[in-house]
Each structure stands twice: as C-alpha cells, then as structure tokens.
Image (cartoon, rainbow, N blue to C red):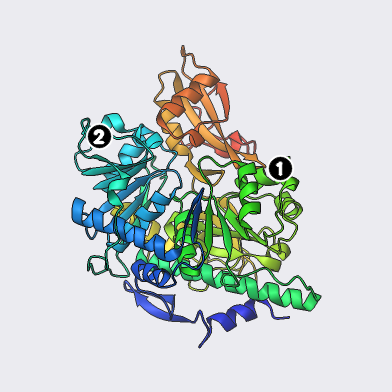
Amino acid sequence: MATTAEVRAQLTGPGGPFEVVTEQVGGIEMKVYKASMASLREVAAAAQARGNDQPFLVYGDLRLGPAEFVERANSVAHHLHDDFGVGHGDRVAVLSANNPEWCLSFWATVNLGAILVGLNGWWKTDEILYGLRDSGAKVLVADGRRFERIAEHLGDLPDLEAVFLVDAETDDEDDPRVHDFSVLAGDPTPALPDVPIDQDDPAVIFYTSGTTGKPKGAISTHRNMIANLMNTLFNGVLTGALAAAEAAEAGDEAGPAPGLGAGQTVSLFTSPLFHVSGCHSTLVVGLLAGLRLVMTEGKFEPEKALQLIEQEGVTIWATVPTMVWRVCEHPARHDYDTSTVTSVAFGGSPSADELQRMVRDTFPNVRTTSNVYGLTESSSAATIISGRDALEKPTSVGPPVPVVDLKIVDAEGTEVPTGHTGEVCLKGPIIMPGYWGKPEATAETVRDGWLHTGDLGHVDEDGYLFITDRAKDMIIRGGENIYCVEIEQRLVDHPAVADAAVIGVAHPELGEEVKAVVQVAPGGSITEDEVRRWVGEALATFKVPTYVELTGDKLPRNASGKLLKNVLRGEGEVSFSETM
C-alpha cells in the first residue's frame, strides 16, 4: 500500500492535480500551486456556474443552492456599491452569530474588492469599538443582540457610514445610518461592478489578541485564502485516496470515507465565521467544493447538532475539540443515527487522547480523524494530520501542507536539527502580508517571508510537527485564543489589586480554563466574584477567569521583573528579587 508521502508526491508532482511550482511572491521565493484562481470572485463565479442541483447552505428552513446563493450575494454587493458607496479597499465589518447574512456579506464584500472585517462575536463594548475604529470600517452588519452593545456609542463612530441589522428592529429617527439588512436584498443584476482585484489585495481582516493587550488585525489576501482553499481540497483528496487504499487492502465492502468531491459531502458547520476555520476553511472551501454546509442556529447545543447530523446525513464535521467533547459526552448521543459521519476534524485547542476513542464510540463509521495546526496569521491550517497518520502519531499536528515551508529555530534565529525544540516558523502563500495599520508588529512577526509563530515545537525524521509549548503567553479555551496580558492589565486597573497573573489550567473538554492569581493591595478588599465581574465588564465572557486565587503575598518575579508563571503553575522553584 502506498505511503502518505508517496501519494502526496503523486498529487503535487508534475502533471498532478495539485502540482506545486516555485514563484516569486512579493519578492519572496515560495512554493505555490500551479493551477490556482486569481481572486475569490473567480471562486464565486465558478460556483454560480454549477447551478442549483444540490444545496449549498442549509439554515433552519432555508436551503440555497450555490447559484442562488451567489446571486443573492451579488445583489448585496450591488446595493453596497450603488446605494452606499462601498468600493475597492473599503472595510465592511460584520458583528454577528453565524447566519446566512454573514455569509452573504462576506461574498458581497470580497467580490467588490472591499475588505471584510470579522469582529469577534464574544467581544464586549470597548473591544467592538476598538475593532471598528482600528479597521476604519465604513459599514457594519450586525445582529440585534450584538448591536445593543454599541448602540449608545454610534455618535463616537463618525467614520461608520451605515449599519445593517439582521433580525432586529430599526428606528431611523435615532440614527439615519441604521437600516434593516433587507434593504441590501433585491432582484439580482446581470453582472457585478467592474472592479479589478489583484491576488495580493486584502480580502479580510480578522483580529487576534496581542501580547501588548490590544488586538491586531491580521490581513488575509485573496492569494492567502485561495492557497488555503487549495490546501483543504488537497487534504480531502489525499485523505480519500489513502482511505480507499486502506479499505481495498482490508477487503472492506463498506468503502472508504468520501473525500471532497466523492458524492456531495455534507458538513456540519459549527465553527464561528469570525475565525479562519469557519470563514476560510469552511465557507470558502464549501462553495467551490460543492459541499452542503449545514449551519447550526444560535448557541451551540449538542443535541441540536445530533439532530442535524441525523436529519441531513452529515458526513464530515470540522470543529474545535470542545464541541466534539460535548456531543460525545451527551447522554442522548446514541439516540440519533450518526452512521453517515465518516470524518471528524478538530483543531484550535489541545486535544486529549481519550477524544479519539470517544469519537469512534459516538460515530461508529468514522474512518478518519484529523487535527490541524494554524493561526489567524497563516490563514488557517499550516499543517494537517489525518487518517492512519493520526493514529500512528497521535500527538503530532502533521506535516506542512504542500505549499508551506516549515523550520524550527533557536532564540538567535538559527535552524535547529531534527528532533530539537525551538520556535515554529512558516513560509508560503498562506502567510499574511501583515497586521492592519501596525508595521512594527508586522516586522517583528514576519521576517523575510517567515512567520515567527511564537509557538515551540519540533519535527521528527518524517517531517511531522509536534507542538510542545507556546512561547506567547496565551491560553486556548474552547478554540478561542486568550492572551493573558489583556486580562492582567484589566485586573491591575482595579484599586484593590496590587498585581495579577493569569495562567491556563488544563480542562478535558475546553482544553484550558483561565485562572487568575491576584495579589490584593494592602488595605484593599476584593472577592473572587468581584474579580470575575470586573473582568466581565470589560472583556468577552470567555476571558473571565473560572478560577481565582487571592493572596496577600508578592507574586514570583525574576530580577528583571518578569512573572514566573512556571512557579504559579507548580512547575518550578521561586527565584526572584525581593527588592523589585
């Protein structure tokens, strides 16, 4: 039976469907796919030409075929362009739960050469206002629940020219800029406005929490997103080919797990659209690949997910481990027919070995489980592991995708030998050109085309990556990145807090939980609940500490004043200057 490396070589070699060549991109030599579209508008046009024989988007009672979906998106684009002056390079922000309007707004925006700004739906008022101001958004699409968080502050956003509300009442007398999203709907027009779009034009800005406490807007270009699209299609074909070979060798009459394109793949869509996994790797991939995306309504509920799996015959589910845990632990999991599910993929937070067993118990016909490693700055997955590789190397996140180069470097930037731990660095057409409006942060993170991830890891003799630690002070809770410094800065603003440290605590379902160690100021008084309330008033709910430890003692720091978080985690000895 062919090895993974042999099948990869066949697919990416000369004449292969995913042939890889070397080109200069922005002055940097990198690997690219020879057959690649030039813009996301080409992706939408290709999907539209496919017609409506099979559904593309399912949301409650709404079922849209790919052509009908693109026509609706084009209608939104025309109204944004003709009625509200949205043009090339303008920013259109979306602040909403997953819904069809989010999807339509994305495709309408990128088809105009404008830039979609995906705001985190968990954000609180100050975070949302920061994102709108930092991006210079001209237009905002929001659902009613999230719009309420900033409704009183519209006067503080003079550059915001229009707001479109989804499933919410509008009152133009309060602010004439506020409209119902339905004003963007209408009869589709024959063609989109003639706007040139370059491969390296920005397509989206997605915010990632920063080590300075302020989120940074990572830009994904059309090139970035199409390269990720090709990577995902490649992995689908690779996984399908390997599964077919395994099934044939085993004499399995049931056949292999379907790869992308083998019949209609039905995907349970639970990843937030303001994450690259939801937008780049599900919405964009799904439209071109002919997937049926079954989108959950409202808050994620495990039993509702099980109902949709049975009702729609879901075949694949790509999400974060948290959601998989919740479904696999639900008492009604065996009351539903989950036999159609053949592939489960998860990434975004640490996954327990037990999860593999639970997946196969809940989904008896799963033949492939996958894990990925990627960042917002890498436009989604940079490495992928699935199938038998995931069983043979369960703690690995896989080899780099075909157009990504990976190296491990020491503190001086020198590449280290195989098996040695260092910082993970990535290069390729998926790497962002930079952070929006932050050239210094960009220069620090992307050097000579290499993205310095801040994550620590090593590669084995087969080139498979193993993540061992995060050099950045970050917690991943249920797939959400949390930078500790942001919470620490909020905590020390409280008059009763002298010092604070935030660390991650392992959790079997969420990956990690947030713990705050708070040094109470002399004469100060604060309770654990008050700590949580104080954080929750300014930051998103998922950043609120689950665990709070109050102390009157100084927190451990070294001679330079750096917090010794390994000591707080119980991993090291106290070694700090008492005079600091």
| Quadrant (top left/top right/bottom left/bottom right) for the N terminus | bottom right
The residue drawn where x is 46% and y is 47% is 98
Task: Return the residue nearer the eye: 213 or 238.
Answer: 238
Is residue 347 shown to the viewer in this render? yes
| Quadrant (top left/top right/bottom left/bottom right) for the C terminus | top left
**Where is 173 relative to 253, above or below?**
above
The residue drawn where x is 29% and y is 35% is 170
- The percent position of residue 375, horizontal first and vertical second, equals 48, 56
Looking at the rendered structure, the kind of residue marked 2 is Leu
Task: Return the residue nearer the eye: 340 or 572.
Answer: 340
The residue drawn where x is 27% and y is 63% is 189
Task: Locate residue 167 relative to residue 321 in the image: left or right.
Answer: left
Looking at the rendered structure, the kind of residue marked 1 is Glu
Q: Which residue is mark 2?
A: 154
- The percent position of residue 346, horizontal first and vertical second, equals 60, 55
* Mark 1 closeness class: few <14, some 14–19, many ≥20 residues within 10 Å: some
Which structural element holds mark 1?
A: loop
- The percent position of residue 220, horizontal first and vertical second, equals 37, 60
